[in-house]
Amino acid sequence: MNFPAEETRSLIDALRDELQEYGALLQLLKDQQRRLISRQADEVLNLSGSIEAQLPVVERARRRRQEEVHGLAGPVASPEDGKSGIRLSALLPFFAATVAPMVSGLVEEINRLVTSVARFARQNQMLLARAVESTQVALRAVHPTAAQTTYTPSGRLHTRLPGLYEGSSYAVA
């Protein structure tokens, strides 16, 4: 049994959309990393907003792909698969021989992008943390009593910079 051509096209479109959105997110993260390394704070901030805006777009594309997979899998899914347990790779035998390699390739590319996105996100997070730490060191050098670092109830470091900007405080979590 092969899946119907129309439903297969719909899944392939969803996979392509997901691939495109993950690619866009990866490009934003790479741009952010370049800006972090070259210390372009305004650009880092702008890119952070763009990244935040891209995340729900990626999530919608991922959900659409999942819905397409669940729709296709209905007739061939086993009861123990459940709604969340269906893997596209398990459905490859049900695609036409001319389509299965393309679906497989799209899935592999999406998985590669997901891994790259996670890696760049971790690296950028570390770079941002180091930038904040460097700023705190510089502020302590200029104004030793300004920065007060304590722990939050959840165990994270919290830095207050009271009085630095006329009674305002700045928190770094």
Image (spheres, helix red, strand yellow):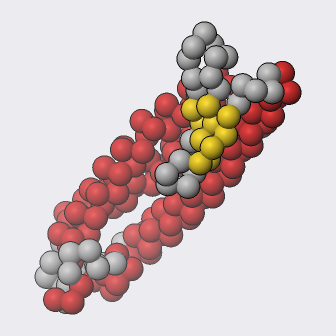
Whether residue 110 appears in this view of the structure is: yes
- Name, please, the residue furthest toward the top: 166
Residue 132's x, y, as percent? Answer: 70, 36
Whether residue 1 appears in this view of the structure is: no
Residue 165's x, y, as percent? Answer: 63, 13
Quarter of the picture holding the C terminus: top right
Q: Is residue 15 placed above or below 129 in the rendered structure?
A: below
Residue 44's x, y, as percent? Answer: 63, 30
Quarter of the picture holding the N terminus: bottom left
Q: Residue at x 45, y 65 (%)?
A: 106
Q: Is residue 93 placed above or below 152 in the rendered structure?
A: below
- Name, please, the residue furthest toward the left: 75
Choose top left, top right, bottom left or bottom right for residue 83: bottom left
Q: Is residue 116 placed above or below 81 in the rendered structure?
A: above
Q: Residue at x 39, y 80 (%)?
A: 89
Q: Is residue 48 left or right of residue 70?
A: right
- Name, please, the residue furthest toward the front: 145
Q: Is residue 161 left or right of residue 93?
A: right
Q: Residue at x 57, y 32 (%)?
A: 171
Q: Is residue 6 placed above or below 50 in the rendered structure?
A: below
Q: Residue at x 60, y 10 (%)?
A: 166
Q: Nearer the viewer, residue 1 or 17?
A: 17
Q: Is residue 25 left or right of residue 40?
A: left
How many marks do you count on the picture? Answer: 0
Choose top left, top right, bottom left or bottom right for residue 158: top right
Q: Nearer the viewer, residue 127 or 143?
A: 143
Residue 101's x, y, as percent? Answer: 44, 75
Choose top left, top right, bottom left or bottom right for residue 55: top left
